[in-house]
């Protein structure tokens, strides 16, 4: 089981918080709110030829939208200016910079790449790139989550009739064209993937795009030729949740607990990758993905095709099992059953495996209790975990834990550091976050120092995974 995208959360005793998300190598570019957009421009969107665009259309900071005569049908919402389009442009800048900044093992390409077959990976062109002498095939080699990122310093062009062909289970949602200036998709061309252009995008007569046309500062012009042009890639198969693979987000074992964080593993669980851009309240839809747990919309931290991190609704407390269903782009999965318990403590680890160095800070600092910054015997550490059960002053599902008064655990856990019971100073939800618990414990004086001192948390008869800290 891969633990990509696992949420690791750090909190100081003074409540200064940092969030770190560990993601898979060659992960898709996070498009943020652009996951619902087919077209985004900085100045103007102009459409001619009628036809259809499937997905939202946005313009910001400009507001000019020219739907043509006959008017194009937009299966979505047109945001001509306004906060939604503004946020989409902000997210596009982030995504553009992410794609441009990828640097692990790029393959150099130049000029015309038509007629070639390319495996998943990072491809870099220091000038322009064209698909002109033949069609381009992108072969996923049986991996439906395969990712391509093309870094293009200048222009991207296709000549008339040229195609990007997907093979081996490739998904257009996982193809990203980062274009340093402008892109031109030639007459009747068939193009696949997300175009992230610094300037403008032109789709000539009858060209089609399974993906997104996203321009930062300039215009997007589309001649549909009367057909369907830009279309957000849809899930090609229904999402699947693996049996028994809805687990504690820290320990990666069952059961899960109401109000706590869980990881759901499967396939086709989202279109691309996205995470909540603010700690709370958490959204219930990301990258066309939503989950119903016990019939209630579950707040989402992070989604990708193979894993989703979410909060189990507080309202399910007291049950021993519940249902879970994923819906991606309107396609629902089969229903799975999730085991619930009153307590299932799990401690977050830094490498998102549930073992090794724990997400444990030296209290009142932003330093990990790790080699080089070891905790002192007699000093306090803050342990970040989930699954500790009911709390006082309970927040709503998806809402952040309050800071005044605190949400304290109704059942006090036991913490052992180096096999020795520790004195607790605080046990409750981490203020400002969703489903995250914080336990402040004193490192016993009798603990033997070392770089891998074990830490566990127990609540009644339930014991957490074991992580380690450094003690001096």
Image (cartoon, rainbow, N blue to C red):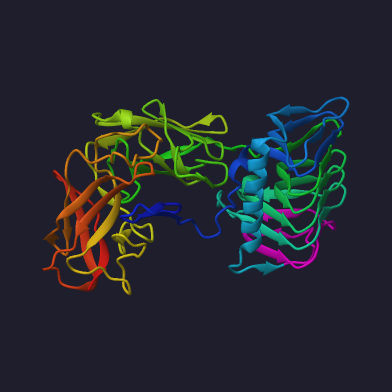
Along the viewing direction, whichever of 413 and 395 lies nearer the viewer: 395
Q: Is residue 389 left or right of residue 290?
A: left
Identify the image quadrant of residue 157. Answer: bottom right
Q: Closer to the camera, 366 or 168?
A: 366
User: Residue 398: horizontal and vertical position, in percent?
Assistant: 41, 35
Residue 1 visible, this angle? no
| Residue found 23% across the figure and 47% down from its top | 427
Write the residue at 44% across / 31% down: 334
Q: Is residue 110 magenta?
A: yes
- Say if 160 sits above or below 84 in the image: below
In percent of width and height, residue 418 lies at 16, 65
- In this rendering, position of residue 67 left or right of residue 332: right
The x, y position of residue 281, in whole percent, is 45, 37
* Quadrant (top left/top right/bottom left/bottom right) for the C terminus: bottom left
Give whichever of 160, 415 is nearer the camera.
Answer: 415
Quarter of the image for residue 101 reads bottom right
**104 up-or-down from 432: above or below:** below
Residue depicted at x 86% and y 43%: 204
Q: Which residues are magenta?
A: 109-138
């Amino acid at each position: 089981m891969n633990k990509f995208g696992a949420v690791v959360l750090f909190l100081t005793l003074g409540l200064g918080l940092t969030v770190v998300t560990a993601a898979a190598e060659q992960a898709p570019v996070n498009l943020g709110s652009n996951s619902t957009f087919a077209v985004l421009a900085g100045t103007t969107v102009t459409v001619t030829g009628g036809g259809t665009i499937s997905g939202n259309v946005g313009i910001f900071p400009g507001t000019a939208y020219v739907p043509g005569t006959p008017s194009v049908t937009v299966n979505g919402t047109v945001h001509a200016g306004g906060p939604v389009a503004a946020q989409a442009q902000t997210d596009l800048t982030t995504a553009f910079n992410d794609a441009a900044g990828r640097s692990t093992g790029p393959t150099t390409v130049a000029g015309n790449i038509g007629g070639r077959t390319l495996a998943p990976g990072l491809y870099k062109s220091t000038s322009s790139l064209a698909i002109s002498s033949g069609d381009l095939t992108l072969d996923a080699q049986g991996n439906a989550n395969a990712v391509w990122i093309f870094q293009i310093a200048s222009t991207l062009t296709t000549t008339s009739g040229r195609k990007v062909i997907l093979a081996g289970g490739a998904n257009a949602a996982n193809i990203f064209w980062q274009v340093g200036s402008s892109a031109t998709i030639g007459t009747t061309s068939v193009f696949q993937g997300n175009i992230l252009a610094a300037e403008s995008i032109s789709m000539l007569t009858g060209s089609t795009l399974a993906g997104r046309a996203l321009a930062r500062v300039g215009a997007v012009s589309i001649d549909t030729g009367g057909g369907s042009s830009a279309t957000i890639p849809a899930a090609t198969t229904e999402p699947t949740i693996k049996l028994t693979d809805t687990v504690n987000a820290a320990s990666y074992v069952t059961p899960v607990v109401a109000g706590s964080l869980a990881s759901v593993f499967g396939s086709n669980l989202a279109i691309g990758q996205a995470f909540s851009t603010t700690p709370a309240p958490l959204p219930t839809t990301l990258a066309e993905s939503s989950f119903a747990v016990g019939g209630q919309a579950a707040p989402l931290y992070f989604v990708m095709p193979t894993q989703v991190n979410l909060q189990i609704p507080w309202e399910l407390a007291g049950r021993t099992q519940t249902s879970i269903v994923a819906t991606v782009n309107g396609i629902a999965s089969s229903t799975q059953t999730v085991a619930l318990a009153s307590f299932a403590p799990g401690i977050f680890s830094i490498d998102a495996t549930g073992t090794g160095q724990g997400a444990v800070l030296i209290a009142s600092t932003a330093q990990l209790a790790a080699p080089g910054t070891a905790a002192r015997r007699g000093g306090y550490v803050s342990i970040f975990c989930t699954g500790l059960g009911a709390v006082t002053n309970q927040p709503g599902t998806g809402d952040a834990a309050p800071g005044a008064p605190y949400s304290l655990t109704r059942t006090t856990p036991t913490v052992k550091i180096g096999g020795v019971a520790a004195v607790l100073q605080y046990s409750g939800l981490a203020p400002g976050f969703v489903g995250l618990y914080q336990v402040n414990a004193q490192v016993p004086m009798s603990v033997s120092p070392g770089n891998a001192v074990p830490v566990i948390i127990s609540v009644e008869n339930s014991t957490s995974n074991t992580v380690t800290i450094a003690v001096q």
